[in-house]
Image (cartoon, grey):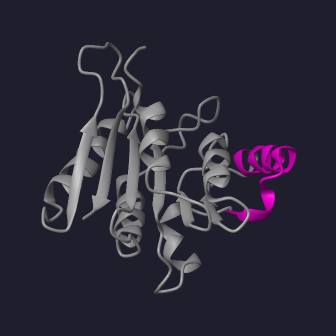
Amino acid sequence: MNLPNALTYSHTLLSECVGPGDTVVDATVGNGHDTIFLASLVGKTGHVIGFDIQEAALKETQTQLTLTGLAPQVELHATGHEHVGDYLTATTPVSGAIFNLGYLPGGDKSLITQPTTTLAAVTELLKHLPRGGRVILVVYYGHPGGQTERNAVVDFCQQLPQKVYQVLQYGFINQVHNPPFLLAIERR
């Protein structure tokens, strides 16, 4: 058995804190893999809120959700994840959230996640994390603009108060081409 890569490990970490009936966020819907995974974890009584600025990504994900029967527990929004607070009440707990930072695989490489909007979304989500809840960031940074976002999210996570959050960084350090790594923020 091999060590899991960052994306595989993100699903392990989410499966430990997300269960039936929970509310979760897919901050970067993309090709829908995380959305479908989260929808299966929360079940018919749960709720997945997904965000993407690319209509084609949302359309493809909606098709996959319909085919898998998971559409009823998912709402997709054609807007940036920095607006997540508009879709949560002040008291809505979010047991898990995931971000895949960078660009949509197979999509327009000039459309990338941005540090300001990413950190605005993370900051909002942290207000909704219950004890044991997790925000996962899978950081792809081997593209123009990626290093800037990488540095911003790492700096942000390093500044989080240790008494309130613990932050894990996970990734391979001996691979070429800037392999993605994972940041997991857990509320204590």
Q: Quadrant of the C terminus?
A: bottom left
**Image position, residue 102 (x, y; %):** 46, 39
User: Is residue 58 highlighted in magenta?
Assistant: yes
**Residue name at image x 62 percent, y 54 percent:** 52
Looking at the image, residue 145 lies above or below residue 40: above
Relative to 8, 170 lies left or right: left
Figure quadrant of residue 144: top left
Extreme residue toward the bottom, this view:
90
157 to 11, vertically: above or below: below
The residue closer to the viewer here, 83 or 87, is 87
Q: Is residue 85 depicted above or below 26 in this figure?
A: below
User: On the picture, is 30 further left or further right than 122?
Assistant: right
Q: Quadrant of residue 21?
A: bottom right
Toward the right, the furthest residue is 67
Range of residues picked out in magenta: 57-76
Residue 115 or residue 4, whichever sits in front: 4
Residue 71: in magenta span: yes
- Which residue is nearer to you in this view: 75 or 94? 94
* Residue pictured at 33% horizontal, 69% vertical: 131
Left or right of 81, for residue 52 = right
Dominant SS type (magenta): helix
- In percent of width and height, residue 90 lies at 46, 86
Q: How many marks?
A: 0
* Residue 66 visible in the picture: yes
Location of the N terminus by quadrant is top left
Query: Residue 71 appears at what percent x and percent y?
Result: 79, 57
The x, y position of residue 30, in whole percent, is: 62, 44
